[in-house]
Amino acid sequence: TLLAAIGPDCLTATGIVCQSCRDVCPEAAITFAPARVPKPQLRLDSCSGCGACIPICPSAAIGLIERSLIEQRQLERGQAA
């Protein structure tokens, strides 16, 4: 199953507030916790892999990858899948 993955080129990594991906996600799978520059969080259980977030991203930081790779990365970072 393919899911969205948000890479290091996300504008929020450089201190720019952007939530375009959240605004177009039909599944509400991308959320932002309140912060000075909120960082995107992907809810794996909600992402359908539709790709609506890809063309809207101004820094081309979003792509689709296999669910198993995302889960593996989260385990390596000590995050729950």
Image: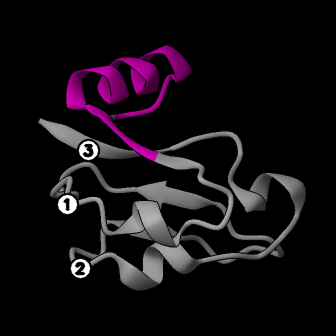
The picture places residue 68, in percent across and down from the top left corner, at 23, 22
Q: What are the residue bounds of the magenta stretch?
A: 63-80
Give the vertical position of 10 relative to 21 (above or below): above
Q: Earlier in the sequence, mark 3 or mark 2?
A: 3
Kindly indicate whether the residue at mark 2 contacts the one at mark 1 (C-beta within 8 angstroms).
yes
Q: Residues within 10 Å of mark 2 (few under 14, many from 20)?
A: some
Q: Residue at 70% across / 70% down in the picture? A: 38
Give the vertical position of 76 relative to 81 (above or below): above
Q: Earlier in the sequence, mark 1 or mark 3?
A: 3
Tag shown at residue 26: 2
Mark 1 → mark 3, Cα distance in angstroms: 8 Å
Give the amino acid at mark 3. Answer: Leu
Q: Is residue 52 left or right of residue 62?
A: left
The picture places residue 14, in percent across and down from the top left corner, at 87, 55
Which of the image's four quarters has the N terminus? top left
Q: Earlier in the sequence, mark 1 or mark 2?
A: 2
Tag shown at residue 41: none
Give the amino acid at mark 1. Answer: Cys
Q: Residues within 10 Å of mark 3 (few under 14, many from 20)?
A: many
Q: Is residue 15 left or right of residue 78?
A: right
Q: Residue at 36% across / 34% down in the picture? A: 80
The picture places residue 20, in percent across and down from the top left corner, at 55, 78
Tag shown at residue 3: 3
Q: Nearer the viewer, mark 1 or mark 3?
A: 1
Name the one closer to the observer, 68 or 2. 2
The picture places residue 36, in percent across and down from the top left corner, at 83, 75
What residue sits right under mark 1 in the picture?
Answer: 50
